[in-house]
Image (spheres, rainbow, N blue to C red):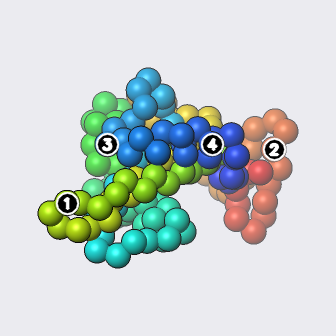
């Protein structure tokens, strides 16, 4: 499993899409998560991205998962954001935040977080990850980061 590393190119792409305040993925792009925030107080970019990643990670806690292989039910279920974040072959991430104004009636601030991943994941029939010891399957050109057990 690869450790995620920030990628400026993916961040620029994500920022471009986030400025449109999308409610859905930029089809046919794979490897993209979108989070929408509605709150009474304006949030910092750090808070918004932190809330987004916590929300996606929480999908595992709330819904569980029964297989390490992506199937149709996993792809269409409430864990597909989380599986993209932990997809073993994904090593790059870049995020952008769109400020989408204030709701006319509730006066709540709307923002959209878009994160893009390279290599994309969530391919039906493919492994999300392979069970094993940390760094046991690092691809050619990658090294083991012993502290995390991830490939870098």
Q: Nearer the viewer, residue 144 or 110?
A: 110
Residue 128 visible, this orientation: no
Contact between marks 3 and 4 (CB within 8 A): the answer is no
Q: How many neighbours does mark 3 have within 10 angstroms: few (below 14), some (14-19), or many (20 or more)?
A: few
Which of discs 4 and 2 lies nearer the camera? The answer is 4
Residue at 43% x, 31% y is: 26
Secondary element at tag 3: loop
Against 55, residue 72 (above or below) is above
Q: CA distance from mark 2 to mark 1?
A: 50 Å
Which of discs 2 and 1 lies nearer the camera? The answer is 1
Against 146, residue 97 (above or below) is above
Which of discs 1 and 4 lies nearer the camera? The answer is 1
Q: Nearer the viewer, residue 100 or 131?
A: 100
Which of discs 1 and 3 lies nearer the camera? The answer is 1
Circle on res. 12: 4
Q: Earlier in the sequence, mark 3 or mark 2?
A: 3
Residue with the mark numbered 1: 104
Secondary element at tag 4: helix
Residue at 81% x, 36% y is: 140
Q: Earlier in the sequence, mark 3 or mark 4?
A: 4
Q: How many neighbours does mark 2 have within 10 angstroms: few (below 14), some (14-19), or many (20 or more)?
A: few
Circle on res. 4: none
Q: In x, y percent, where is residue 8?
A: 70, 46
Q: In x, y percent, where is residue 134?
A: 68, 57
Residue with the mark numbered 3: 23
Q: For residue 28, what is the image quadrant?
A: top left
Secondary element at tag 1: loop
Contact between marks 4 and 2 (CB within 8 A): the answer is no
Q: Is residue 133 left or right of residue 111?
A: right
């Amino acid at each position: 499993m690869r450790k995620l590393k920030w990628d400026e190119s993916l961040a620029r792409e994500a920022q471009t899409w986030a400025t449109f305040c999308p409610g859905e993925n930029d089809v046919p792009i794979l490897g993209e998560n979108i989070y929408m925030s509605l709150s009474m107080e304006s949030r910092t970019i750090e808070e918004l991205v932190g809330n987004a990643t916590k929300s996606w990670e929480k999908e595992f806690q709330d819904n569980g998962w029964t297989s390490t292989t992506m199937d149709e039910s996993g792809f269409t279920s409430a864990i597909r954001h989380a599986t993209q974040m932990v997809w073993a072959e994904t090593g790059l991430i870049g995020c952008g935040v769109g400020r989408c104004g204030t709701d006319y009636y509730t006066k709540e601030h709307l923002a959209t977080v878009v994160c893009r991943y390279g290599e994309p994941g969530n391919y039906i029939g493919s492994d999300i990850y392979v069970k094993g010891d940390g760094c046991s399957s690092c691809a050619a050109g990658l090294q083991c980061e012993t502290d995390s057990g991830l490939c870098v």
